[in-house]
Image: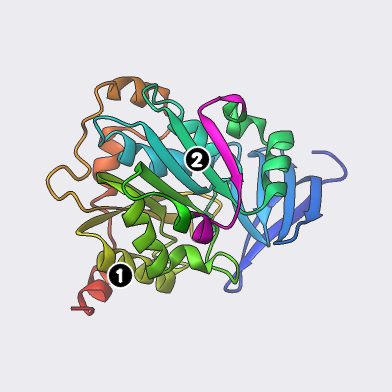
Amino acid sequence: MNKDAIWIDEIHKNSRYGLKGKILSREKSEFQEIIILETEEYGNALMLDGCWMISDKQEKYYHECLVHPALTSLEKISKVLIIGGGDGGTARECLKYKSLLKIDLVEIDKLVIDLSKKHLKQVNENSWEDPRLKIHIADGTKWIRERNDNDYDAIFIDCSDPSEFSKGLFSLEFYKECKRIMSKNGILATQSESPESFKKHHINIINSIKEIFNISSTMYSFVPFYPSGLWSWTFASDDNKNFLKPKFKNLKIIECSCEVWNRKYQKGAFQMMPNKIIKELSKRK
Ligand code: SPD
């Protein structure tokens, strides 16, 4: 290990989640502190305001689970919206769908994209060069208000944990807007925090989504270096009949391209809601 290597920790509720490596970049944008760390074990890792977002070797646990349950359940995918996702990993997974014509990616912090282009090439591969991907530097909660009704087949919310500037992406108003701009059988997919280390936020996200959409479901899996390691993704739609049923005809090709996700993995992950979360959610009625 390089002699300049230092430990960088995410500190969450008196626990540390650390990686040792060499700092490639440490900058403050208008919104947050951005660190890129080069590690031996996990490749390059991105931290925003003290929270780990991705590392080269673990990001597939996160991005494949966010994207494929949604996109394999659609017969036809032409237009997709990504809110956040400045590291390019979600876009990379979406671009595997050849029928897709356009992705709008709305990221508030241009510096995250610039640094990802420079240091996180393994994550975004060549997604930024794909003519189907259009970048918008804007606040997603405002940008979405100006979009037409029923315009997107899928919307991905790929954001950081709730904070002063990201909390709008977890609000009822924002989910309502997502529903308005989604096609009738469209699907929303959001990272929904950890049932263990962010339990309150996790429950709030699920309850808010239930308030807005006819149908929703949450899957659980791992992102090893996130607080507690246990993470979740919630999917929602207004189309009760076809929700999360595999319909994409080249599903096998997608499966083969993945490191973590496959149909069986997904099936198990949707059965993993911890009992304490089931109990909490049942209190709401
Ligand atoms: N606690 C970290 C939650 C971060 C979720 N978003 C990660 C962004 C990856 N594209």
In the image, what residue occupies the spot 36% across and 23% down? Answer: 99
Between tags 1 and 2, which lies in front?
A: 2
Q: Which quadrant of the rendered structure holds the C terminus? A: bottom left
Quick check: 160 left or right of 173? right
- Identified by mark 1, the residue type is Asn
Identify the disc placed on residue 207.
1
In the image, what residue occupies the spot 24% across and 56% down? Answer: 216
Quick check: 73 left or right of 165? left
Asked if the magenta segment contains residue 132, the reply would be yes
Residue 217 in picture, x, y percent from top left = 25, 55
Residue 256 in picture, x, y percent from top left = 37, 21
Compared with residue 196, is residue 243 higher up or lower down, i.e. above or below? Answer: above
| Front-lying residue, 12 or 156 | 156
Q: Mark 2 points at which residue?
A: 104
Segment tinted magenta in the rendering: 129-143
- Identified by mark 2, the residue type is Asp
Give SS at disc 1.
Answer: helix
Q: In which quarter of the image is residue 45?
A: top right
Identify the disc placed on residue 42.
none
The single residue placed furthest to the left in the displayed view is 241
